Image (tube, rainbow, N blue to C red):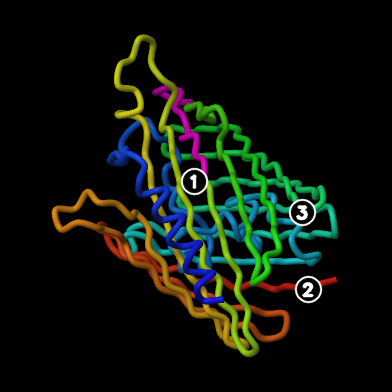
Amino acid sequence: MWRNALYWWVGFLTFFFALPNYAQEHGAGDAAHFLQAGLGARAYGLGGAFVALADDATAVYWNPAGLVQTPSFRFEGTYESRSGGLVDFQYIGGTISWESLGIGALWLHSDIYSVYFFSIAGKLGNLRWGITGKLYAFSATLQSAHGLGADLGVLYRLNLREGELSIALSMSDIGWSRIHWYGPLEATDYVAWVSRLGIAHFSQWESWELITTVSLETALKRPPLPDERDYFAKALQVEFRAGAEVRLGFLRLRAGLRGLSFESPWGLSARPALGFGIRTGVFSFDVAWVSSPLGDTYVVSTEVVVKH
């Protein structure tokens, strides 16, 4: 079983590191960029490679198709401190799902930003699908902004001879969601069109479980300008993420890497992530840490899960 899990890792890593590296620095023309980092302590602890898991209340963000994996009611609250405490986020969300239908909602807030997520998901055999609608609301002195966005996700679960495999694809802010600013300065900005492709492998032994997950994220920051040359070199961002979770009874141990690339003069570079979780009855508690050049990020989440 160890060998089987290793094969998935090596195959996926080889495929995506063979792609050209188009990673660009984060810059202007990328409204609501704060959303690209992700949501939830569990996802952060896995390096952000969560699109093929998406099995908690943050599925409305990562991949709404994940809402129909386990019939249950979930309610989650999270506090997040980014860049060494420069920016704080709070979000609460809830989902309810049955065998072939799921719905969910989440509210994210930070100072001048608020984003509202509303999702619905369904199931066709082993294929799950989901749709999310979003409302952006920004407010500052003499200025305000609003916008609408749409996400789409699919997730396929496959039983293997040893373990289980999940393959997923999600697209966020399809067609570049528009943010319209009102006030002394009126303008229109775009939210990046983000696509995530991921694979997760599940292995189980008598007393513990192992989940390994990898994902590739691409973001087009804005639409192309008329007659623009080198559009992809200017607008495309690419990030590779990987993570693993070990389950030992009530304890969850996580480690991940995000921003994997070979751009560093020393070869492979990445930002490490660590996390742990505790499951007791219907309650769960998760903590994560992610390294960042601007200051470390810390995330704390609590969730209530009632299966039915």
| SS of the residue under disc 2 | strand
Residue shown at 67% from the left, 65% from the top? 160
Q: Is residue 20 left or right of residue 242?
A: left
Residue 222, image x and y in percent? 42, 27
Q: Nearer the viewer, residue 140 or 106?
A: 106
| Distance between mark 3 and mark 2 Cα atoms | 23 Å
Amino acid under disc 3 = Asn
Residue 131 appears in the figure: yes
Residue 126, labelled with which disc? Answer: 3
Query: Which region of the structure is painted magenta?
Result: 182-196
Examine the rendered structure and indicate whether residue 44 appears above or below residue 280: above
Tags 1 and 3 touching, CB below 8 Å: no
Q: Helix, strand or loop at disc 1? A: strand
Residue named by callout 2 = 306
Q: Residue at x 77, y 53 (%)?
A: 126
Please tell me how crowded label 3 is: few (under 14), some (14-19), or many (20+) other residues with Cα within 10 Å: few
Please state, as top left, top right, bottom left or bottom right, where the C terminus lies in the image: bottom right
Q: CA distance from mark 1 to mark 2?
A: 31 Å
Q: Amino acid at mark 1?
A: Tyr
Count of all numbered marks drawn on residues in the image: 3
Q: How far apart are labels 1 and 3 at the CA level?
A: 37 Å
- Eyeballing the image, is 182 above or below 259? above
Q: Give the dominant element type of the magenta stretch: helix, strand or loop.
A: strand
Q: Quadrant of residue 152?
A: top right
Residue 290 picture location, percent across and down: 37, 66
Name the residue at 55% across, 32% down.
Answer: 146
Of badges 1 and 3, nearer the viewer stands 3
Q: SS at mark 3?
A: loop
- Name the image quarter holding residue 218: top left
